[in-house]
Image: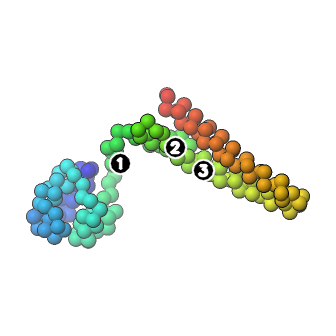
Amino acid sequence: MNIEIANRLLELRKGKKFSQEELAEKIGVSRQAVSKWERAESSPDTDNLIELARLYEVSLDELLFTTEPIPRKDENVANEECDGGVHAKEKDNTVVYTALKGFWQISAYSVAVTVVYLIMGFFGRLWHPGWLVFLTIPIYSIWVIERLTRKHKKNNSR
């Protein structure tokens, strides 16, 4: 847990003039659990966070908002943000790519292919052979993903 959140939990509890024991009793946890939250040794689960927010009369955003980014504990996460909106997560030697930029490129291409198909059908009466243009979508998608993957790997090798 982030020390800033832990300090905020401590301040809110003291602001309501609760002891750790009183707070623990109100939300149904042990006093030791409250103590660990306030020392940033552990984090309250979602249900307890909701109860704390209700009890302190604050939103969850107010309860958890920090100005500093919270560090990740997962050591297998590599390169959260890369050029072009590409995010990579490495886990068990498997790399999963989510290419936001690629998504928009693929979507725009799919719309363009649909427009071409409709034009071929309405103006050229080529409805039956026109469906072949849709076969280019997966080919183009694979090309975009491969290009973004190559760019991502190139940026990581620097």
Helix, strand or loop under label 2: strand
Q: Quadrant of residue 91?
A: top left
Is 126 located above or below residue 93 in the figure?
A: below
Cα distance between the residues tagged 1 and 2? 23 Å
Left or right of 68: which side holds 136? Answer: right
Q: Amino acid at mark 2?
A: Tyr
Q: Residues within 10 Å of mark 3 (few under 14, many from 20)?
A: some
Residue sitting at x 80%, y 60% = 118
Location of mark 2 (residue): 97
Q: Amino acid at mark 1?
A: Pro
Q: Amino acid at mark 3?
A: Phe
Front one among 157 and 11: 157
Location of mark 1 (residue): 69
Front one among 127 and 75: 127
Of labels 2 and 3, earlier in sequence is 2
Q: Position of residue 1 (x, y in %)?
A: 26, 50
Q: Residue furthest front?
A: 128
Cα distance between the residues tagged 1 and 3? 27 Å
Residue sitting at x 24%, y 50% = 3
Q: Residue 85, can we see it?
A: no
